[in-house]
Amino acid sequence: MVHELPTWFEVAALTAMGVLLVADLLVVARRPHVPSMRESALWVAFYVALAVVFGGVLWAVGGQAPAGEFVAGWLTEYSLSVDNLFVFVIIMTRFAVPRDYQQRVLMVGIIVALVLRAAFILAGAAVIERFVWVFYLFGAFLIYTAIKLLRGDDDPEEFEENAVIRGLRRVLPLHTAYDDGRLRTVVDGKRLFTPMVVVFVAIGSTDVLFALDSIPAIFGLTHDPFIVFSTNLFALMGLRQLYFLLGGLLERLVYLPYALATILGFIGLKLILEALHANQLSFINGGRGVAWAPEIPIWLSLLVILGSLAIATVASLMRTRARESLAD
């Protein structure tokens, strides 16, 4: 549902979040460096604490319902963002991006993701308001994505250049060196593009696929565009620092895809049940809502999300420790 939050609160909150995100990105532009583990951990902890505080403020202003939807949505988007980092790592490795320039690449990826998600959210909200039956499609898509994750069809180690990147390589005159992270360089009097251009396109085109997963998932938890956008903003905040903090730990989260598959499958089922409950399609129950279709409460969604992530994390760490013990 769309909550009646005060307009001043929505404007102030979005402005503050936008300024904070832009300030974080400007730090990268002015002082590019490889953050230490301590620096990354402090920033990630700061952004996580900020999200928790925002949830509390949202509870005080709008009540339990919007606060619960925000927390569930933020956890879902954040967990999907962690999974996205797998692909970022593969892209950085695939194109041999020097570590000093990886912050800049992540900054561009975050900006592109923010713009794409904003467009998808506005379009999704407009479509949902007029066509409730689109939840059938969203739900089916999320269940399909969950099945692909369980089967391992989305293995990030199998990243391949898409048609856009291959076309770019054919059209643009490219140099092999990064030349201090510039987009263009001069070699023997010729102006050439550096591989950084291809990396930016790879990150940007991958962000489109990320948005296709994350936006239907968040609309399965809340229909309020303000909460949807807020969860995405908070999920993107600290993503750059999280990348450097996790590093090799990403390889240890071997069961994360199963947790994400559980979450996406659950939300997909929730969307289909909601579509049945508010059914308007004439060939289903004569165009009337299906009475037996239950509405899944937000507390159950929170329980499934938190439980899936906790079980996957603990099981992953136990498995990696067992492997290390056997190796010793």
Image (cartoon, rainbow, N blue to C red):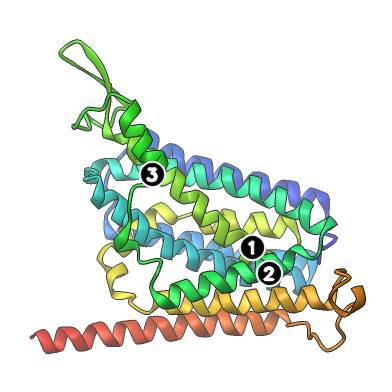
Q: Is residue 224 left or right of residue 146?
A: right
Name the residue carrying label 2: 220
* Type of amino acid at the residue the image marks with label 3: Ala
- Vertical placement of 254 versus 1: above or below? below
- As drawn, the residue found furthest toward the front would be 283
**Nearest to N terminus: mark 1 or mark 3:** 3
Tell me if residue 60 can be seen: yes
Q: Residue at x 64, y 63 (%)?
A: 216
* Type of amino acid at the residue the image marks with label 2: Gly
Q: Residue at x 41, y 82 (%)?
A: 312
- Nearer the observer, disc 3 or disc 2? 3
Label at residue 216:
1
- Label 1, label 3: how far apart the Cα atoms are: 23 Å
Q: Is residue 289 left or right of residue 105?
A: right
Res. 57 image quadrant: bottom right
- Label 2, label 1: how far apart the Cα atoms are: 6 Å
Name the residue carrying label 3: 202
Q: Position of residue 67 (x, y in %)?
A: 70, 70
Dot 2 crowding, Cα within 10 Å, few <14, some 14–19, many 20+: many
- Vertical placement of 292 versus 10: above or below? below
